[in-house]
Image: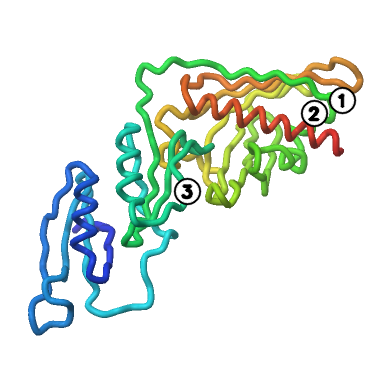
Amino acid sequence: MTMQQITTFLMFEGKAEEAMNLYLSLFKQSEIRSITRYGANVTGAEGTVQQAVFALNGQEFMCIDSSIQHQFTFTPSMSLFVTCAAEEEIDQLYIGLSQGGEVLMPLAPYPFSEKYGWVSDKFGVSWQLSLVKMSEDIPKRDIVITRVFNAPIELVWRAWTDPEHVMQWWGPDHFTSPSAQIDFCEGGISLVCMRAPKEFGGQDMYSTWAYTKIVPLQRIEYIHNLADKNGKKADPVQMGMPADFPQDQRHVVTFKTLSDNQTELTVTEYGWAVGHMMEMSQLGMEQCLDKMAASFAIG
């Protein structure tokens, strides 16, 4: 039995060799492995690429110069996703690939990546770049956030257990929550979704809360993971997160009555690698709790 091999195939119009040379100048372990050119008296401009095979970081691609003009071109709905291990690497790629092209999302920290950029190069090929640092020897720390709400404990409890309430606050500023499937019982798993604003790409990001302990009106313990839309656990790195983004992370939420209309809430996220993603997560949860407080004022 022959193993099927899937190779990205890029079709240019007279710019294939120029594109290959640009990519080879930016990526390590790169080479043109074979190239065939159009000759005289054939369909296709003489000397342009009839077919070529090249490698970037050891990964093989194919390309051609189309022998006919066509009404379509590359589109950002299909892109090449590159994970980078160092800031210098992602900065170099971003500059080289965006020059003469179009920036779709500027290189910056985002909730889903500590440094990310999305560009279409000058040939129209779309590239997503994400910084993924190694997690070796990074110290760990817990995030602990305490907030006092002017709301009775029953209402604060419902904010975590009722899907309509969860959708009002889940996600940092400018994000929305289009769905929350809540299975609130020990052994149950909830699937919650946050949607990025259009300027951040507009994508939906899913998380699961797998409940391990519930003490009514006192304590909720659950295991947090990133997931796909069906609730299947997802690898954070494959979703553009850094390598130190936690999996199977323990979260504990505690509730304490201070008065009839005042409740103290404490959220603890255990085992974060100290760094930018931990800071982003803390900021995101604080913004979520701001939205929760606003929902109590409205309700």
> CA–CA distance between discs 3 and 2?
36 Å
- Can you name the residue that lies furthest to the front here? 100
Amino acid type, residue under disc 1 in the picture: Pro
Disc 1 and disc 2 in contact, CB within 8 angstroms:
yes
Q: Is residue 7 left or right of residue 42?
A: right
Q: Is residue 97 left or right of residue 14?
A: right
Residue 130 percent location from the top left of the image: 40, 40
Mark 1 or mark 3, whichever is nearer to me: 3
Amino acid type, residue under disc 2 in the picture: Val
Q: Residue at x 37, y 29 (%)?
A: 133
Residue linked to disc 3 = 105
Q: Residue at x 53, y 34 (%)?
A: 225
Mark carried by residue 152: 1
- Can you name the residue that lies furthest to the left here? 40
Residue 230 percent location from the top left of the image: 56, 48
Residue 75 percent location from the top left of the image: 41, 63
